[in-house]
Amino acid sequence: MLLYLLPSSGIVFNKDFGQHILKNPLVITSMLEKAALRPTDVVLEIGPGTGNMTVKILEKVKKVVACEIDTRLVAELQKRVQGTNMQPKLQILIGDVLKTDLPFFDICVANMPYQISSPFVFKLLLHRPFFRCAVLMFQREFAQRLVAKPGDKLYCRLSINTQLLARVDMLMKVGKNNFKPPPKVESSVVRIEPRNPPPPINYTEWDGLTRIAFLRKNKTLAAAFKQTTVLATLEDNYKLHCSLKNVDIPADLNVKVMVENILEKLDAGNKRARSMDIDDFMAVLQAFNAEGFHFS
């Protein structure tokens, strides 16, 4: 939650909420330009703070839904718009955004509390109905992971899971000297545009597969699937699948051999998660599903 401080407020910012004072207004202006706001838009803002960004958004759109966990800042924000033509256009949701049911919105703009970055991204991407785009500020390394490609040092499960569901672009770097007090890390702003329609797969299954593969991203898939816990889970899921489909479970069921055969047919046993792209994982998921193996 990266904030301006109103000189009159005298608020001490709460580090537990990731609160820092953003002292460069050009960053906010640039973020809003990149969001390409329209007069008919409903905008979701996370962590509005004392409202400097909120006020600029309200000038351009039909409505802002601001989600804020700190009641002191909610009071400041309400005071700021009270008695103005912006007041009826502002709705404030008080509480933890991760535990809040998000309303309809066209655009999301946020200076994110960095500690909730990952769960919030996936809450956003699984939200329906679809929104147009999100312009979000993150810790720089997190932003780099979002846009990393196969083979990149920072490529990870976050990268491929996000890119499956959205197009992600790096917009700009924001140095720590733009904040007071300066955070320990540099920041970056990214633009996230959901893929609409989404890919025709079960995301929970996809997430289960990438979780196994990226547990040790430098290991081969053959090694990842030899783990006892992985084989046990696949066997449980296989038996459940057979039960639901009224399929007889083979008396000589050997999940380890079946998994090895699937990977061998795909020529995927020696592949490593660090260098696999979305199509590679799609092929693996479809091959396992075809043999009755599921990851959720």
Image (cartoon, rainbow, N blue to C red):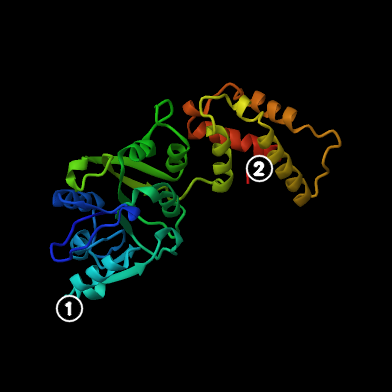
Q: Position of residue 64 (x, y in %)?
A: 28, 66
Which residue is at a point 74% across and 33% down the rendered structure image? Answer: 255
Which residue is at a point 69% across and 33% down the rendered structure image? Answer: 228
The residue tagged 2 is 294
Q: Where is residue 282 in the image (x, y as percent from the top left)?
A: 55, 36
**Quarter of the image holding residue 40?**
bottom left
Q: Where is residue 176 in the image (x, y as percent from the top left)?
A: 22, 41
Residue type indicated by callout 2: His
On screen, residue 175 above or below 51: above
The answer to whether residue 249 is left or right of residue 146 is right
The answer to whether residue 86 is left or right of residue 110 is left
Mark 1 element type: loop
Q: How far apart are marks 1 and 2 (CA)?
A: 57 Å
- The quarter of the image holding the N terminus is bottom left
**Quarter of the image holding residue 14?**
bottom left
Binning the other alpha carbons within 10 Å of mark 2 as few (below 14), some (14 to 19) or many (20 upward) gives many
Q: Where is residue 171 in the image (x, y as percent from the top left)?
A: 25, 41
Q: Which of 280 and 238 is in front in this view?
A: 238
Q: Which of marks 1 and 2 is in front?
A: 1
Which residue is at a point 36% across and 40% down the rendered structure image? Answer: 142
The residue tagged 1 is 83
Binning the other alpha carbons within 10 Å of mark 1 as few (below 14), some (14 to 19) or many (20 upward) gives few
The answer to whether residue 72 is left or right of residue 96 is left
On screen, residue 259 above or below 170: above
Residue type indicated by callout 1: Gly
Q: Which of marks 1 and 2 is nearer the N terminus?
A: 1
**Quarter of the image holding residue 269?**
top right
Mark 2 element type: loop
Which residue is at a point 66% across and 31% down the rendered structure image? Answer: 227
